[in-house]
Amino acid sequence: MRQLTAAVLGFGDRSRIYSNYSFKHPERLKIAAVVEPDKFRLNLAKKTFGLSDEMCFSDYDEFIKKSR
């Protein structure tokens, strides 16, 4: 099975639970970006997934512009 690359849109409780799959099966899922308006949650997601500042977004439109 090939690895999927995904972005987390909103880092609330449900997203944290679902994204834990990437730790249990890193060969199947890689979290590459996070969109979260709350600064605390955004920073938590950044640390959780080891993301760079360039892959953390506080605004959905900002994320869409970067992904093009």
Image: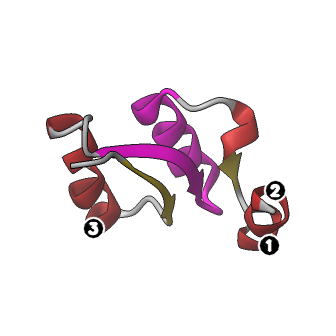
* Helix, strand or loop for disc 2: helix
Residue nearest the observer in this picture, 47 or 23: 23
User: Is 46 covered by the magenta stretch?
Assistant: yes
- On the rendered structure, is 51 left or right of 44? right
Q: Are marks 3 and 2 in contact (CB under 8 Å)?
A: no
Callout 3: SS: helix
In 3D space, how far apart are the residues under numbered discs 1 and 2 (Cα atoms)? 9 Å
Identify the residue at horizontal 21%, vertical 57% (top origin). 17
Secondary structure category for the residue under label 1: helix
Residue 49 sits in quarter: top left
Query: Depth check: 59 or 5 in front?
Result: 5
Q: Nearer the viewer, mark 1 or mark 2?
A: 2
Disc 2 packing (10 Å; few <14; some 14–19; many ≥20): few
Q: Amino acid at mark 1?
A: Asp
Residue type at tag 2: Lys
Tag 1: Cα neighbours inside 10 Å, few (<14), some, or many (≥20)?
A: few
**Residue 7, relative to residue 2: is it above or below?**
below
Task: Please give the range of residues in magenta.
Answer: 29-50
Of labels 1 and 2, earlier in sequence is: 1
Measured Cα–Cα span from mark 3 to mark 2: 25 Å
Q: Residues within 10 Å of mark 3 (few under 14, many from 20)?
A: few
Q: Position of residue 13 (x, y in %)?
A: 29, 62
**Mark 3 or 2, closer to the camera:** 2
Which residue position holds label 1? Answer: 61
Is residue 45 a member of the stretch shown in magenta? Answer: yes
Q: Quadrant of residue 12?
A: bottom left
19 sits to left or right of 38:
left
For label 3, the residue is 14
Give the mark nearer the N terminus: 3 vs 2: 3
31 relative to 15, above or below = above
Seen as rendered, the residue at the extreme left is 24
Query: Residue 66 bears which disc, if any?
Result: 2
